[in-house]
Image (cartoon, grey):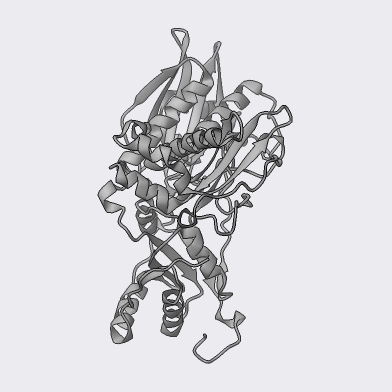
Amino acid sequence: MSVSGSKSAFTSGSAARIVLLGLFLAALCAPASAVTVSGLYAVEVPIAGASQGQLAKGYADGLAKVFVRVSGTRDVLAQDGVEAVLTDAESLLLSYQVLRGDSGESRLRMAFGAVGVNRALASIDAPVWGANRPLTLAWVAVEDRGSRSLITERQGSGASGGNSATDAWQRAFNQAAGDRGLPVALPPAGFSGDRELLSDIWGQFINRVRDVSEDINHDALALVRVNRSGGQWRAGWVFDGTVMDSGEESVTAATPQALAQAVVNRWAELYANRFAVAAGEVGESPQVDIVLRGVTSLADYGRINKILEGLTPVVNVGASRVRGEQLTLRVAFSGELDQLKEYIALDPRFVVMESQQSPGVALSAPDDTPSPDDAPVPVASEEATPESGSPEPASDSATDTDTESGGQPMFSYQPLPVDEQEAEQAFESLYQVLYYRWQPASVIGSGDGQ
């Protein structure tokens, strides 16, 4: 499927060589741990049935959840004009699937277009928070009935760790993080027996916690202490890290699940206040950063630039940074990002670089969270896009979608292999960074590489 759009040629000749040479001289920076949230625009909600009216309600419910994730605030649902946009949720839908469980209940799995959702938020003057988000390493100490424990990630996909209480807290925080699209990592289970570290977390003494966190990917540390207070649960925390540094805050709630949700809700709002883009900055032409490795010469750059400019969705291409053999391009495009990725995939010289999962990162959220954008989510139709009308259902029967029962992870966080400067830029970008390896030798053709 093609999406038409105007093109403007990028600087060529000697001017381009000067730009590229300057970029090659850029200094290297220290590594950082920015994370891309996969599945941010996909969601799953319960529905009463598969009639037109029931599906329309499901579309609206799903888009409301996506709006909260992408804006970074629950206040978006009180924004003027939001009801009209939710009523027309089907126009933003890329695909959907009706799932039916063994006991007869129905759920609606949907994928919305990132560009369409971002523009819809901008149309009601709501902020837009991109898919590249800081990773918070949460050290959570819980005191219950006089006993304190550290909440950690479970070892292996099915291990319970032998402590149902701490497992419940772990699930609660992962669920809350998935609901809000906020990358939250819990420390490895090996730290669970460190009583001295647990005391430091409870006292919110940062120095030792910072030291033991050096080998765990993160952008910010959160030291959280949880205890019962007046018949409710209370969580108080402090942050440490350049992307988030604030004084102590606290929330209360009746249950562990509600408390974890309240904590993560507050964190998401704090991050969104810093990194979300104002409605007026969304713009008509979305832009994405494309990082290519293996670019060794100006000739490579020229070929890459010419190829990308020739793709139907591409509006323009500009070089933004070079580090050694790594070239970063900023590409403005029309249509949806997935369409641009499909066009690039047609050229074997662009080899997708699969991101390795980061140790300690919450790889999946529980049952109501969707498949990643790049996972095999059922597609309604090859032509099912906002421009081509209402999509048709892919299936009316459920597949194995329960992550707790051994299915594929339905929500994932993918580390961005970038330095500190690039991470800061990625946090302020609306779309995921695309990584490729430039492999011109894979194509046998004319001397110009075409």
Hey, which quadrant is residue 30 in on the image? Answer: bottom left
Looking at this view, name the residue that lies furthest to the top: 230
Looking at this view, name the residue that lies furthest to the front: 52
Q: Position of residue 418 (x, y in %)?
A: 44, 58
Looking at this view, name the residue that lies furthest to the left: 280
Residue at 55%, 43% in the rendered image = 110
Number of dots carrying numbers: 0
Residue 133 versus residue 344 in the image, above or below: above
Residue at 34%, 26% in the rendered image = 248
Q: Position of residue 357 (x, y in %)?
A: 58, 50
Looking at this view, name the residue that lies furthest to the right: 102
13 sits left or right of 362 in the view: left
Residue at 51%, 64% in the rendered image = 341
338 sits left or right of 193 in the view: left
Q: Of residues 231 and 96, which is closer to you in this image?
A: 96
Note whether residue 324 is visible. Answer: yes
Hey, which quadrant is residue 20 in on the image? Answer: bottom left
Residue at 50%, 33% in the rendered image = 57
Note whether residue 199 is visible. Answer: no
Q: Position of residue 162 (x, y in %)?
A: 70, 25
390 sits left or right of 204 in the view: right
Q: Position of residue 338 (x, y in %)?
A: 50, 59
Residue 153 versus residue 113 in the image, above or below: above
